[in-house]
Amino acid sequence: MMKNLSLILNIVLIAAVGYLYYHSFSGKKKDGPAGTSLAPSQWKDSNCNRPPIAYVELDSLNENITYIKERRKELETEQKGIEADWENGYKGLEAQKNNFLKKGAAITQEEAQQFQSLLMQQQQQIDGKKQTETQKLNEKSFNVMDGIQKNLKEFLTKYNKDKKYMYILTTGTGLDYLVYKDSTLNITNDVIRGMNEKMKSAAKQ
């Protein structure tokens, strides 16, 4: 599951930036040319004559927003722990089986059947524990993704109040549909700085 975490994060971030257009521009448009900055901004970019479009590099967000990196590391560590517990459980079963077989010809049919039944019960317990822990981790992962999406939506909505972008596109590994990108339209660094500040402030509350 964790090997697909970056892809999942990209999908979440795509949903968040896609939301921006509908949230900010689905109603009545304000007068004035698109891309005109009507008020000073806390986040500055290099594009003075700003067109009504911008893009965000999702890979950079995943690798440079501290909150995302920390949560991803936590989830990966928990996943590795679940896998390690499961593997150790099966190693224990293998050790029990080897010790039992050392009795050789002294093993009766009844003892063999009882041991096999016990081993199967333990195997079911090991598999059941892994399934339960994985489900809990999936739920935690979903909550993390949901929180990231919520905070990114809030940030982009605030960020775009004076930027007046009509569209914010996304680009990233496996999700890059932009065949040409003008670097002056790249607002990734703004989003990274803003999100790091936002999440740091939220952590202090």
Image: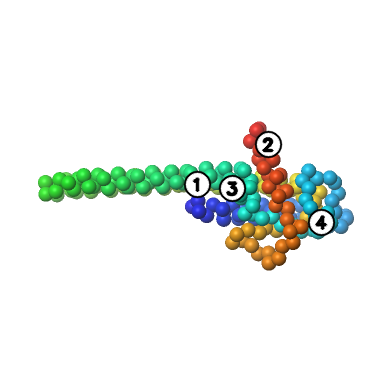
Provide the secondary structure element on which disc 1 rests.
helix
Around disc 1, counting alpha carbons within 10 Å, would you say few (fewer than 14), some (14 to 19), or many (20 or more)?
some
Q: For residue 50, which numbered disc appears in the image?
A: 4
Query: x, y (%) of residue 197?
Result: 69, 40
Q: CA distance from mark 4 to mark 1?
A: 40 Å
Q: Is residue 67 visible?
A: yes
Query: x, y (%) of residue 148?
Result: 62, 46
Q: Nearer the viewer, mark 4 or mark 3?
A: 4
- Could you tell me how many numbered marks the image carries? 4
Around disc 2, counting alpha carbons within 10 Å, would you say few (fewer than 14), some (14 to 19), or many (20 or more)?
few
Task: Say what amino acid the circle numbered 1 marks.
Answer: Glu
Residue beneath disc 3:
145
- Give yes or no for contact between labels 4 and 1 (Cβ–Cβ under 8 Å): no
Task: Say what amino acid the circle numbered 4 marks.
Answer: Arg
Residue beneath disc 1:
76
Around disc 3, counting alpha carbons within 10 Å, would you say few (fewer than 14), some (14 to 19), or many (20 or more)?
many
- Give yes or no for contact between labels 3 and 1 (Cβ–Cβ under 8 Å): no
Query: x, y (%) of residue 173?
Result: 60, 59
Q: For residue 201, which numbered disc appears in the image?
A: 2
Residue at the outermost top position: 205
